[in-house]
Image: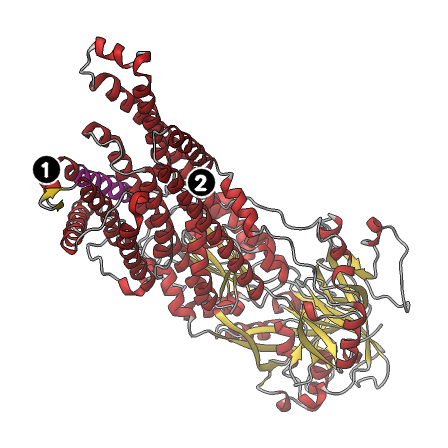
Amino acid sequence: MVKFQDIKGLTDKEVEASREKNGTNELPPREIESFFDKLKDNFEDPIIRILMVALGITIFLAFLGYTDWIEGFGIFVAVFLATFVATYSEYKNENSFRDLQEQASRIENTVFRNGKPIKVLASQIVAGDYVLLQAGDKVPADGKIVSGELMVVQASLSGEQDAVRKIPCTVNNYTTDKAEKEIFADPYLCFRDSVIDDGEAVLKVDSVGKKTEYGKLAEELADNETRDSPLQVKLNDLADGVARFGYTGATLIAISFLFKQIVIDNKYSLDAIKNYVSLSNWHVAFHDIVTCLILAIIVIVVAVPEGLPMMIAIVLALNMRKLLKANVLVRKLLGIEAAGSLNILFVDKTGTLTRGVFEPQMFISGNVKPYQKIDQVPEELANIIVFCLKESTSVVLGGDGALIGGNASDRALLSFVPKNALKLKSNTESVKEILFNSARKFSAVHLAVQKDKPRFLTSNEIVIIKGAPDLILPNCTSCYDEQGKQVPFKLDPLMQEMDQISQTGTRVIAVATAVAPLGDGLPEKLTLVGIIGIVDDIRQESKPAIEIAQKAGIQVVMITGDRKETAVSVASQIGLLKEGKAVLTSTQLQTLSDKQLQEMIPNIAVIARALPTDKSRLVKVCQDLNMVVGMTGDGVNDSSALLKADVGFAMGGGSEVAKEASDIVILDDNFKSITQAILYGRTIFKSIRKFIVFQSTVNAASLLIVFVGPFLGIDFPLTLIQLLWVNLVMDTFAAMAFGGEPALVKYMHENPIPRDERIISAHMWSSILINGVFIATLCILSLTFPFARSLFTRDGVPSEPVFLTAFFAFFIFLTAFNAFNVRTPNSINIFDHLFANQGFVMVITLIFIVQVIFTYVGGRLLRTVALTANEWGLVIGAASIIIPWDMIRKTIVLSLLPLSKPAHSNDRKKN
């Protein structure tokens, strides 16, 4: 069997030759919906179809002379622009979202080239490359195992979830004639997109890119998943509810308009009503029916919030780059939205709260003698340490001297070995190996010594074990003394010393030997080499980040595989262990029933010696309490818990399978970045809510104006084209304005958003209904009071076209000014953090500018004429009254409906 250290790999010249001959490892890009396909789909929207029917009716009536051609043309332009803008925004933001994910999710593999191991992107791998595979990796190409052993899950190819054993192939130019369905059972071959469940091995690549089995099936395996996230489902349900209200309102308004025309305008006279419906007056009735139909269409157009899906896309796209700069990659919209609602977060210690860089600090012999460095250890014992650490690892020395492969603990242990010893060629061969994982908590290797047998060995074979002292020390019957001789071992003195060391936060690993052969479990009679203490420094950011999370009402629970003493030390330093908080071990956890555990959950701060199954159980128990649960993880064994959690946070340096199981990837493995994800989750949810309030207020005011207008003698206070213009301007511009809202630190001083909280809260309803009615009332009063009309004259005479133009601008500016109120839903200070969202200021300014320009150029299309500077001043000044009005509303509403108390780690509500 080929040894890792003996693999040289391809040269740069051979890599280029292979790429030219066999192609690249890139797969053909998946087909995505084109812009014009999206545009076509949007024109098939039921609402757009209704508008197109209205367009047809308008053109028909224009042909008969009942309406103006310009109105039909205006409807066509407005519908096309609204659809085009929505399509462009959706298409652009989807592409941006996908590109950002692809850039941040590029997979790297370790390959051997030019005689040393290096990291390359999976797309750069070529046929003939030797690739180092470890648990959690995805196989980047098809090939055969030449060294090591793997357990591989090939579900994406074979549909089978069970792991398949893969072993080295000793036959040169090995080929198989098995049928396609049977080829995946071949013990020597690995296939692209398979996941390494356990083990470590080197794969020699035979096929790349579209020549791989996965490449051949790429079209069938294309991800056609189009299911909406829960947030989108909620918003779609809201849109459906509002749409139903719109259809009902349209019907009622149509009926009330006909009742007015037929009954009220005829002063309830039966003879007049009969005359109205007589054939001699058919053209009058027909005109009113057409007007009634257009009114109904206007109501539907106004009521239906078509901008919601576009707004979600814009908000996510605008925040994606901010999140990426904060080292947070959002894989699923659900994840970032749910992150803002977290009640409890289970977080790994190693690499998240700590730096994840282990450094050896000391060695303690079986006779309880401590040594700070290897050169302080007596020569004979030092030789045993060097041999056991060097020959029991798959870590290899890179060209720059870096240690590559293996796990973090293995690399730390090997860094205890002198550099010159690492460069010496190995003289052993692996017979059998048991790799470390969090469930078994030890690794073992059975070695055959080929030559130059060390003096301490009594035969040419030996078993070396490394792992948790709690597991290994009870099986030790002897230990090596300073002269390298085996002497009786006493457990208690070493356990006492180890407990003291662990209390400083030092992680301890036991190293022992056993007589060959190696079975399937931990050997019973071991000889202890010693205990190595390694330190993983706590990140400076961890403690303040923990405090931020706790102030946000989130219970943080540290989960670690370390001993209880080590876990307690770290938890105390980062502020997790406060009065009344409990520390449990996996063993204690297993003695508790789910009901008992639920009662303890609010007080748990640390889980030590944790198993993967503990994580999944904790998620379920907390979800049964209706908590929103977050879980971090980086390994294969964490995948189940990451999938089950409401928000799974995978570490950027973790396994690919963990990343695929997650909702969010923390690229820098830092707890501080997790709090950033939570902050942005809350910010995005608030931005969506602000947009809903803004748009719903516009819709509510429009509906009231359209309903009341005919009873005031004005069939169309706002024309169909004007309302389409309102929807086009308000939907698109408002989405951009609120999508750029800043992530404010104060959001992390609030309680988590409850899982079952409605999108529209009581405070939001007060804003929508009160301001909607206020805007509509102002508009209706301006329509009915002669004084308002007298302010808009030409040649000293009130002008109806000028007044209706001013009325249209008045309505637009009222809603635009209301955007400032909506930005600060819980504060009367409309300038609060205003310039932190410069896009908002620019967009609202643009709305004013565009409205003024289109007033001059809209003409018959928008039913507008030019206004004077004084008239513009009157309109803008009158429209600004919505700001002090809302200040009064907020003051009263906040006194009647006070906001929830700020979250505090020590007094927030327990579930």
Q: Please identify, in this view, whether the residue under mark 2 or under mark 1 is nearer the observer.
A: 1
Which residue lies at the image location 42% right of the left edge and 53% below the top edge?
342
Which residue lies at the image location 37% right of the left edge and 34% below the top edge?
300
Which residue lies at the image location 60% right of the left edge and 46% below the top edge?
225
Give the camera-side residue of 508 and 195. 195
Task: Give the residue type at disc 2.
Answer: Asn
Picture coordinates of residue 492, whole percent (x, y): 59, 71
Give the camera-side residue of 781 and 176. 781
Position of residue 633 relative to residue 723, above or below, is below
Q: Is residue 891 left or right of residue 108?
A: left
Which residue lies at the image location 76% right of the left edge and 82% below the top edge?
115
> Can residue 582 be seen?
no
- Residue beneath disc 2: 236
Label 1 element class? helix
Give the camera-side residue of 209 and 416. 209
Picture coordinates of residue 642, whole percent (x, y): 55, 54
Q: Quadrant of residue 681?
A: bottom left
CA gap between label 2 and label 1 equals: 43 Å
- Residue beneath disc 1: 786
